Amino acid sequence: MDTSQQLADLPPLTENGMVAIAIFVGTLYCFLGYRTLKFIICMTGFILAGGMAAALGGYFGQGNPWIMMIAGALGGLCGAAALIFVYKLGLFMLGMLATALAAHMVLLGRPESWIVFAVLGAGVVGGLLAVALEKVIIILATSTIGAWFTVCGLGYFLVGPSFLDIMQEPLELGRDRMYVAACWLTLAIAGTLAQFATNRAKREVVVKPG
C-alpha cells in the first residue's frame, strides 16, 4: 500500500488535523526557527525518530495507519528527548535534515546509482556546517525545512492525496513539481529574510542600552 493510499484510509478529521499540524510546524520552522531553537530541535528529533518509527510500524503492521501513528508518536517522543539533551547533535540533525531534503528534492527521479550517496553526503556536510556556523546555517536550515512542510501541507489541502504523487515526479521544466519547487524556494527565501531581520532587530534592542 502506498503512502497516498494510507493517508486516504485515515478518517477525514484525522487526516486534515495531521496536515494542519504540518502547516503550523512548517510556518514555525520557516519564520521563527532560530528564535525558538530549542523547541525546533525538539521537534526535529520528534520528526526524524517518529518518521523512522512510523515506517517500521507500517512494515511490521502491514501498512495499518493506526499502528504507524502510534509507533511514530512513541518514537518521536524518544527522539525529541534525545536531541533536547544533546544540543550539538540537535544542531547537526537540523543541518543534515535540511541539506538532505534539498538534495533529495533536486535529484529525485534521476536513475543514477550514486544519488543516495549524494543525498547522504549533502546531509553530513550540512550537519557539520550547522555545528560550525550555528546561526547562519540554522536559519537557512529551518527556513528550508519549514517551507517544505508548509508547501506540502497546503498542496495536500488543495489537491488531495494525489499531491504526494506530484512530489515523486522528476524535477523538470513544465511539470507540476517544478511549480511546487518554485513555491518552496520562494517561501524559504522569505523565511530566511524574515529570520535575519527579526534576529538583527532583537540584537539591536539588546545592544542599544549599553
Image (cartoon, grey):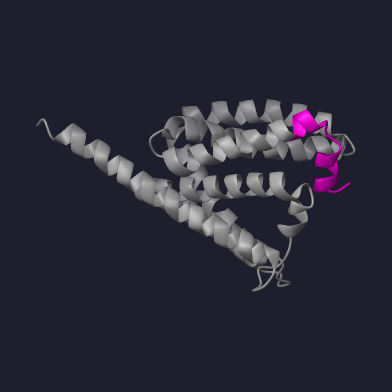
Can residue 134 be seen by looking at this rendering? no
Q: Residue at x 60, y 31 (%)?
A: 79
- Residue at the far front in the pictured view: 158
Image position, residue 109 (x, y; %): 72, 67
Specify whether 153 is left or right of 44. Answer: right
Residue 117 in the image: above or below residue 84: below
Q: Considering only vertical position in the picture, is 111 above or below 142? A: below
Task: Say which of 46 and 83 sits in front.
Answer: 46
The chief SS type of the magenta part is: helix
Q: Does any portion of residue 119 appear in the rendered image?
A: yes
Q: Measuring 42% from the left and 35% from the top, which residue is drawn there?
A: 37
In this picture, residue 62 sits left or right of residue 73? right
- Toward which corner of the image does residue 22 lie, by quadrant? top right
Q: Nearer the viewer, residue 175 or 43?
A: 175
Q: Which residues are magenta?
A: 1-15
Q: Give how far across and how far down residue 100 sits, in percent.
A: 57, 55
Would residue 130 be found to the left or right of residue 9 on screen?
A: left
Is residue 50 one of those drawn in magenta? no
Residue visible at 70% across and 44% down? 157
Where does the image place residue 193, in percent across and percent down from the top left? 37, 51
The correct choice, above or below, for 2 with respect to 170 in the image is above
Q: Considering the image in quadrants, where does the C terminus appear? A: top left
Question: Which quarter of the picture shows residue 69?
Answer: top right
Q: Residue 136: x and y, percent?
A: 36, 50
Q: Is residue 110 above or below residue 94?
A: below
Q: How many numbered discs sit on the rendered protein?
A: 0
